[in-house]
Image (tube, grey):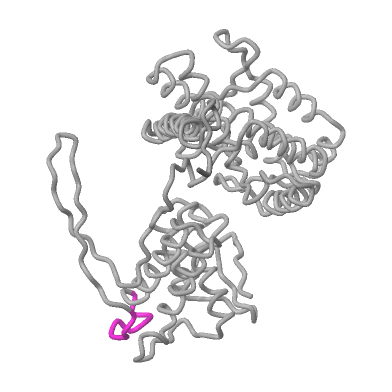
Amino acid sequence: MATLEKIHYTPFKLECTETGIQRIPDPENAIVGLPQIVWADQTPWREANLWALEQAGKGTESKTTMSCITHLHAYAKWLESQKVDWWHFPAREADRCLTRFRGDVIAARDNGELAPSTASQRMSAVIRFYKWLAASRLLSADWPMWTDKQVGIRLIDEFGFARTMMVSTTNLAIPNRKAPGEKLEDGLLPLSLKDAHAVIQAAKDHGNYELYLMLKIGFGTGMRIGTICDLRIATLQRAVPDPTFPGFHKLAVGPGAHPRVHTKFGVTGQVWISDEDLQLLRDYMFSPKRLKRQAKAKEGNRDIVFLSKDGNAYGEGDGNASRGISVQLGRLRKEGLINGITAFRGFRFHQSRCTFATELARVAMKVGTVGMAVQLVRQALLHKSEKTTLTYIRFIEKTDAMSGMADAFTRDFLGLGGSEKLSNE
């Protein structure tokens, strides 16, 4: 199958010298971690790799470039599995590579293998690649790839005035049709406190200690996996007690913190961590197990708290966890299901953040106003937009209301809570 690799790319620049024009390496503009797709026969997909280079050269964020090329890598694996060329566009529409791929993506979405948003983004990335091919004249624009169409999007501004904006799309686009029901960040649902404790205990009993600590910190602070993987020794050493919340310290994270710790959207702020969890991390960072890993690490990674057994960072520096975390979490998920822990069915690390946020919002709304709860959750989770925080508040209000309705329905309609009971008469 096709593989996705990262390279250190050093471009060249042309300079006129006395002996003529020479190609001189330009290390100042080097690209670290440039994604590249390699076919199963070990030949590069030159067109896709050139597109990735152009995207990175335009100043596009590495995470965005990586996301696009990841979707293209999935397309490359599909092409190999179907033994279809990426330029296969016969006259019959149903036989074209893009049409067939779209059908398989929709089938994967309907079967629950892909989230609706992922399916939409995957097809969109592939179409963008083909549009670039046509614009670059690497593929004939006269080939029947798709049918363009105009779609009107109705927008309402802050003053209530509506306008329609026309956008171009294709007949291959996959709409992002979300499943009914309230969902939080990344379309996930939180766990109950009982399930959260079961997941943490399973990680302690069956996973490695690093994964156990990461999950415990995730459920206890709401930090994303990318932030947890980038925590530094000095970050823990410089934690300060929070006078307003006894039993908690504050950790400075973000590009403005010292040292810098990765956060989504580059938000700088402070996150709460309990004294118990902080002490666990401080005990671990000077443990013999971690010090052995630190000795194997590169100079720039030695102050990272979580290191693999080979001394490598678990994070990739762009907010994404390494494949090692995914593999370990997959093993733990499988072990948990074998032991009858249903919370591991479809479990993802980000659910630790959803669980922390919903519990914090629920407690805040019990003792204070909704406005105070919004500000507290936004501050704790370092949300860039208050709109994201409001999804948690609405989720709490809706689930509590639904719980009350379910109790009332059971009590009044089924007669389980009162003296009157339904009979078969």
Q: Position of residue 286 (x, y in %)?
A: 81, 28
Residue closest to the far top: 243
Residue closest to the far bottom: 91
Which residue is depicted at the point 38% across and 74% down? 130
Left or right: 35 as drawn, with respect to 247: left
Asked if 231 appears above or below 338 in the picture, the reply is above
Viewer-side residue, 409 vs 71? 409
Q: Where is residue 54 in the image (x, y as percent from the top left)?
A: 42, 64
Q: Where is residue 251 in the image (x, y as percent from the top left)?
A: 59, 23
Q: Where is residue 350 in the image (x, y as percent from the top left)?
A: 58, 42
Q: In which quarter of the image is residue 153?
A: bottom left
Asked if 270 appears above or below 28 in the picture, the reply is above
Does residue 143 belong to the magenta stretch?
yes
Which residue is depicted at the point 32% across and 86% down? 143
Magenta segment's dominant SS is loop
Q: Quadrant of residue 249?
A: top right
Asked if 256 appears above or below 160 in the picture, the reply is above
Does residue 27 belong to the magenta stretch?
no
Which residue is depicted at the point 49% across and 52% down? 62
Left or right: 16 as drawn, with respect to 423: left
Part of the protein shown in magenta: 136-145
